[in-house]
Amino acid sequence: MLKFTPLLLAIIYGIVMYRFSAWRLGKTLDQQSTELADPQLKQFTDKLAAALDLPRIKVHIYEVDPVNGLAAPDGRIFITRGFFNKYRQGEVTAEELTSVIAHELGHVALGHSRRRMIDFSGQNALRTALILIIGRILPGIGVLIANALTSMLAARLSRSDEYEADAYAAALLSKAGIGIGPQISLFGKLEELTKSRKGVVPAWLMSHPATEDRIAALRKLEAKWTNA
Ligand SMILES: [Zn+2]
């Protein structure tokens, strides 16, 4: 029994962290968000809604500066104030912003946002367990190995999520009659848009695959669909 205590503690820690993170994120979002109301943008989100057979797509503005989109674990979609301002200033088109909303809808539909919160706290639990286990065999260096293994696993998981959300968005945008053009043009702009804030790398970009790889994946889908 004593042998398993560290592992059990790590699991309990993981569950508590998950609950706490989800609660804290929900609270922050409640306090710092408003519903997005923009007639021009609504024309496009209504097309997404029609393609999904939904009455409408509800989007919120998250009052922070970094350019980012977010899918909360409870299924709400957020665009940051910084991103919305870029749209208002004409740097990002309504179609491009709609492509971000479609991407975030993909994370919700595919269950990523909820899983990601589990990933995050699950990661801590896994890290703790690995440190305990590897640390016994290889004192000192065990921590480094445990950290490296956990980070590698997390990066792999989130990268595949991004490709999946991109593919979902591409399918939805195509069905809605908007097409994947805005997705591709936005990827080209994204690096420029986020460059101005050095040091504050948005979560949306942090774990993202290289822009060219994302564009290539979309082109591949487009080719497949147009040949069918
Ligand atoms: Zn994403």
Image: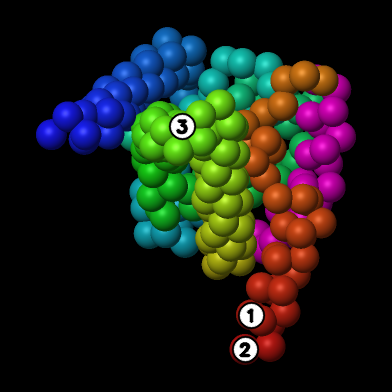
Q: Amino acid at mark 3?
A: Gly
For marks 2 and 3 on the same chain, the one whose residue lies earlier in the sequence: 3
Q: Amino acid at mark 1?
A: Trp
**Residue range of the region highlighted in magenta in the rendering:** 177-197
The image shows residue 172 at horizontal and vertical percentages of 54, 61
Q: Which residue sits at x=48%, y=12%?
A: 32
The image shows residue 144 at horizontal and vertical percentages of 59, 32
The image shows residue 38 at horizontal and vertical percentages of 59, 30
Whether 95 is drawn above or below 196: the answer is: below
Whether 54 is drawn above or below 33: the answer is: below
- Res. 93 image quadrant: top right
Asked if the residue under mark 3 is in contact with the one under mark 2, i.e. CB atoms within 8 Å, the reply is no
Which quarter of the figure is the C terminus placed in? Answer: bottom right
Pick the residue in front: 40 or 191: 191
Q: Residues within 10 Å of mark 3 (few under 14, many from 20)?
A: some
- Assign the magenta stretch its main secondary structure: helix
Does the magenta portion include 115?
Answer: no
Mark toward the viewer: 2 or 3 = 3
CA separation in Å, label 1 and label 2: 5 Å
User: Which residue sits furthest bottom?
Assistant: 228
Q: Which residue is tagged 3? A: 135
Q: Which residue is tagged 1? A: 225
CA separation in Å, label 3 and label 1: 50 Å
Q: Which residue is tagged 2? A: 228
Which quarter of the figure is the N terminus placed in? Answer: top left
- Res. 113 image quadrant: top left
Q: Which residue sits at x=32%, y=19%?
A: 20
Asked if the residue under mark 2 is in contact with the one under mark 1, i.e. CB atoms within 8 Å, the reply is yes
